[in-house]
Amino acid sequence: MHGDIQQFQVDLRGVVDLLSRHIYSSPRVYLRELLQNARDAITARSEVDGAGGTIRITPLTEASGEFVVRDDGVGLNATEVAELLATVGRSSKRDIFDLPRSDYLGQFGIGLLSCFMVADTIVIRSRSARGGASVEWTGSSDGTFQVAELDEDLPIGTSVHLIPRFDADDLLRPAAVRELATVFGEFLPVRVVLETSAGDEEITRPAPFLDARSDPDAAVQYGRDLLGASPLDAIELTEPATGTRGLAYVLPFAPPPGSRQATRMYLGRMLLSERADDVLPEWAFFVRAVIDSTGLAPTASRESLVEDAALERVREQLGAGIRRWILELGLREPHRLAQFVAIHEVGLKSLVRHDDELAAFITRWLTVETTHGSMRIGDLVERFGHLRYAETVDEFRQVAGISPSAEVLVNGGYLYDADLVRLIPDLYPHVTVEKVDVTGELDRLDPPPLDDRAAAVALEDRAGVVLAASDCSVVVRSIDQSALPGLYVADPEVLRSADRNRTKGITGALWGGVLARIDDTLSVGREEDLRARLCLNWSNRVVRSLTGVHDEAVFSRTVQLLYIQALLAGHHPLSDADRTLMTTALADLVSLSAGLDVDTIDDAR
């Protein structure tokens, strides 16, 4: 047995609460919905008799007690107004106005109900361009409405009258209405007029981001207002299949790391969102775009876009336009491209690691530090078929001092640079990349000539005793830089251990104990000697002369100063013990040169 079929009953109060809490972000959208409805009606009338084209807004005043929006669009008859305004969730404007998809903005029958977020009563008066009597529809927030035919002949079009709620009348007053009308409707293709006590005020104006070629100065000024600074450039973007076009303004400053530039998005020149983050590819963080489209679909709230095939195509085509700008700029104005890369280089390096599309056309313009100076990747791979790189800045500074001039060493210690260098063989197959090891580089150095080998070994032993307290061993090698007396060599684990030791000296017992346990744990099963090494350069005159120094005081103070000099040359921080060693060694050498005996010096202390 089957019961009678019944209609769902809609609780209007519940629907309004749903709109205000879960669909629309703010009651401010009421005016956007009214402007959209009015614009749709004007578009429909153009198909009937070619007339219409103005929307007039009258803000709430103490004298009138109501807010009014009037349009000279197609209007509604009694049947149409009942069907259109009594149906929730249906695209009834499209059916009644018989509009093609690209010519209307509203798609959901809930648009008018957004007005109940600011008003307790909505009154709509209308007269249809197709004929028929004038009608009046009155709806209340309690869920009731009534429709009546009027005896008077209203002008063709529609007027919406809002009686404000006690807590929302500020949104219907002149200051708020002027702001909202400008934000949502300043670029509409129909005339929007705000009626004020001082007379009519024009809201609409030409869209500078759509008329850049006819008025480039206005387009640049719009970008300046948008960014708060003059853009580096304005890129014209277009995707004809969806009627999408606009401008992408290149930022003259680096945005915060990881940020994604949001797009100001319009649909049919009506503002959809100030921060649509899905219109451009993620890698296009260096532009702020203003885009209008007639073919993309909005969500129910009309504050974002539906993620569909059309949006994916738009994103792809707009991204291609930005890539094309970069490539053309590199060909026509390489100095401007260099300026662009200098501003956004860190962000570009961050993204090319994960974005093959971006990496393919931008990597060659990025720069890295090398032993031959700062170089662009494109120039680097043209000059060198084999690249060696250091993982950290400390390693680079150590290895750079002993790197052969015929080779190139890249500093991978700066943010993202090591990842960038490792990416190079994928982009340039003829180039090979090798990661350097500090201790391995030291082993590559030639020992002193065979005739000098015994003297060099003796020097290693004597100097090693001097620096034993500094936890540093000594090796003697021939480095092809005679002006370099010595090089402080320490692999990353040694440097981390030194950092922990320095930290233990300035922290309390709790953290000192934690760091000591870390050292104990890391030392388990470790066979190598975890000490730094001072590499003395046998090609240096001062180092060779040390073999003839028999005064132990002079010898030890000289070795100590060479150790400190190597630390400073490698930009390594000096510990308290290192600073004390430097001060005493220097003072002692001065005293010894003055003829004082080392015992006298020690007694003076």
Image (spheres, rainbow, N blue to C red):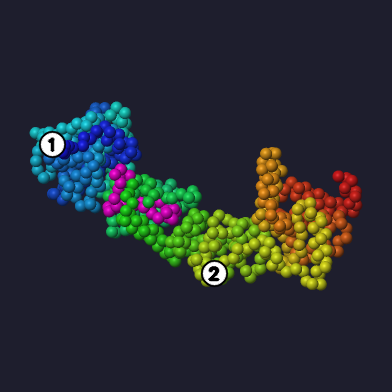
Place of residue 489 in the rendered image (x, y in percent of width and height, measured from the top left): 70, 59
Residue shown at the point (14%, 34%) measured from the top left: 147
The foreground one among 394 and 422 is 422
Q: Is residue 281 magenta?
A: yes
* Depth order, front residue of 95/548: 95
Left or right: 118 in relation to 343: left
State the mark number for residue 135: 1
- Under circle 2, the secondary element is loop
In-front residue for pair 439/346: 439
Q: State the separation of the CA atoms marked 1 and 2.
A: 78 Å
Label 2: how many Cα within 10 Å (few below 14, some 14–19, many 20+): some
Where does residue 137 sit, x and y in percent of width and height?
16, 34
Q: Looking at the picture, how far across and down is residue 427, in whole percent?
A: 49, 66
What amino acid does circle 2 point to?
Val
**Residue at x 55% of width, y 67% of height:** 380
| Marked residue nearer the N-terminal end (1 or 2) | 1
User: From what the image shows, is residue 167 above or below residue 521?
Assistant: above
Amino acid type, residue under disc 1 in the picture: Val
Range of magenta residues: 279-303
Q: In which quarter of the image is the C terminus?
A: top right
Is residue 186 visible from the viewing direction of this image? no
The secondary structure making up most of the magenta span is: loop
Q: Residue 542: x and y, percent?
A: 79, 63
The residue positioned 30% from the left and 39% from the top of the image is 29
SS type, badge 1: strand
The residue carrying mark 2 is: 431
Left or right position of 4 against 311: left
* Residue 549 appearing in the image: yes
**Image mark count:** 2
Q: Is residue 396 magenta?
A: no
Q: Are marks 1 and 2 in contact (CB under 8 Å)?
A: no
